[in-house]
Image (cartoon, helix red, strand yellow):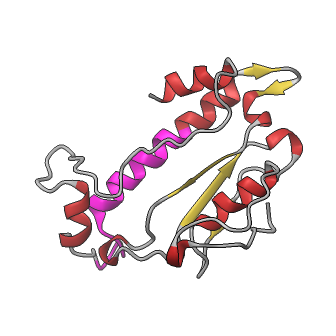
Amino acid sequence: MTDLMLMAVACDQTRVFNMFYAAAFSATTRPDYDKPHHTATHEEAVDDHEKCQPHVSWYTKRAMEEWAYYVQALANIKEGEGTLLDNVFIYATTDQSFAKIHAIEGIPMFTAGRAGGKVKTGLHLDGGKSPGTQLGYTAMRVMGLDVPSWGEQSNNTAKEIGEI
């Protein structure tokens, strides 16, 4: 799916899209582990040494590896004096920060691309107490959309991320 989306962007068949590597209620499984992703978030104990849920972290790591593949692939496509990555803005987040309790505070956010020079690139943002939708809202504002806010209920925001 990643390669198909890359071609759609490179051929200017789309300019805006969402790509999910794992749905919030995913039943994705992994080899040698008996619980699917979502069930593991509820049931796997936190490893005292690692300070995380190791199997749940495996799923997140796989999704982030795919995102990194996508970013690198955009960087490999020449466009004008630079690359396709220079002319796009993409971001990645998880749907929660601490899987065990499905916390939404401190959701990690990553950015790549420069949007033709409109944004700083390669950021890892600590969401702190802000909703994860703040990055999506910022992206909409960077692209010139005049929207008063974005998100639902506790994930609604009207605040942009200034570092971008």
- Which residue occupies 80% across, 53% down? 142
Location of residue 160 in the rendering, given as x and y in whole percent from the top left corner: 75, 68
The part of the image, by quadrant, that contains residue 156 is bottom right
Residue 62 lies in the magenta-colored region: yes
Location of residue 144 in the rendering, given as x and y in whole percent from the top left corner: 82, 50
Residue 58 lies in the magenta-colored region: yes
Magenta-colored span: 48-68
The part of the image, by quadrant, that contains residue 13 is top right
Location of residue 1 in the rendering, given as x and y in whole percent from the top left corner: 44, 28
Quadrant housing the C terminus: bottom right
- Which residue occupies 35% across, 70% down? 99
Left or right: 163 with respect to 98?
right
Left or right: 63 with respect to 158?
left
83 relative to 47, above or below = above
Of residue 77 and residue 157, the one placed in the foreground of this image is: 157
The part of the image, by quadrant, that contains residue 100 is bottom left
